[in-house]
Image (cartoon, helix red, strand yellow):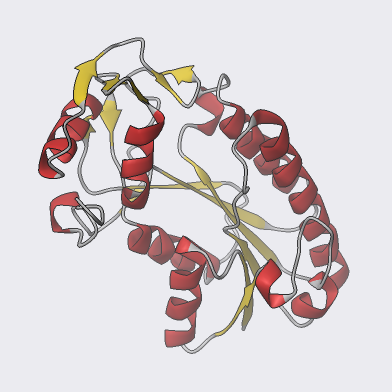
Amino acid sequence: MKFVVIGGTGLIGSKLVTSLRERGHEAVAAAPSAGVNTLTGEGLPDVLAGASVVIDVSNSPSFEDGPVLEFFETSTRNLLAAEAAAGVGHHVALSVVGSRRLPDSGYLRAKVAQEKLIEGSSIPFSIVQATQFFEFVPSIADTGTEGGTFRVAPVSFQPIAGQDVARVVGKVAVGAPVNGWVEAGGPERFPMDEFFRDALAAWNDPREVVTDPHARYFGTELDERSLVPGDEAILGEIRFSDWPGRIPAGK
């Protein structure tokens, strides 16, 4: 089978391409650097020729409300149209757990728009909704820091290693389309404030972590279930304490 991985040179895509090839599949890494641009449609007909499955793990270069919505809507429309023309039988997309529970987040509104385009297309699909990646933990702390203080809500937090995300997406991609969602989360659930307090301490980071029930996460307030998957989620295998990248470079 031929798999085309949109965003195949990125954090998740590169791992996914390697994993699929190790299983004996033909996996093509599609990205602007490889001559494939989903925003313009450049290269899509050629790269999708003979493809059975398309996996979209691409991400917007901007998280601002307008540009991120334009990215996901335009790229998804172009991709779905090209897939229909090529006769692709399975569209797999990576999204975010809780996307529809957090409408105040511009990024998550854009992911919901992407999901709805996929659901409304004629192509059988599977959407993998994952929790926050271990790799994004430092940037989450940086985004929420003001004046040396990081305010964070005391809600449940269940991050997952990028390697485990790639494993789940690959498992879903080689199976039959579910025409719905599959959730993925890490093997452990933490109080979010305690998690970041421990993480920053391990980095010898002097920032103060302040517990604040009204702290905003990328523009939206959280409740206990906002960021965690349901009971049927596929869980990762790598614990944060065992993850080799848990101490950021330079810390």
Residue 98 image point, x, y percent: 47, 32
Q: Classify residue 202 as left or right of residue 159.
A: left
Where is 233 relative to 109, above or below? below
Q: Position of residue 194 (x, y in %)?
A: 16, 28
Could you tell me which residue is drawn at 76 percent across and 83 percent down? 50
Q: How many marks?
A: 0
Q: Position of residue 170 (x, y in %)?
A: 47, 68
Closer-to-camera residue (118/176): 118
Image side of residue 3 versus residue 39, left or right: left
Which residue sits at x=57%, y=69%?
8
Depth order, front residue of 171/190: 190
**Viewer-side residue, 36 vs 234:** 36
The one nearer the camera, 184 or 162, is 162
Q: Is residue 199 above or below residue 10?
A: above
Q: Quadrant of the N terminus?
A: bottom right
At a point 22% along the width and 37% down the height, the residue shown is 189
Left/right of residue 170 with respect to residue 111 in the rendered view: left
Q: Quadrant of residue 171?
A: bottom left
Vertical order, 13 against 125 (above or below) = below
Q: Is residue 158 above or below residue 23?
A: above
Residue 224: where, in percent of width, then height?
31, 20
Q: Is residue 232 visible?
A: no
Residue 63 falls in image quadrant: top right
- Residue occupying the point 46% across, 62% down: 11
Extreme residue toward the bottom, this view: 24
- Residue 5 visible from this viewpoint: yes
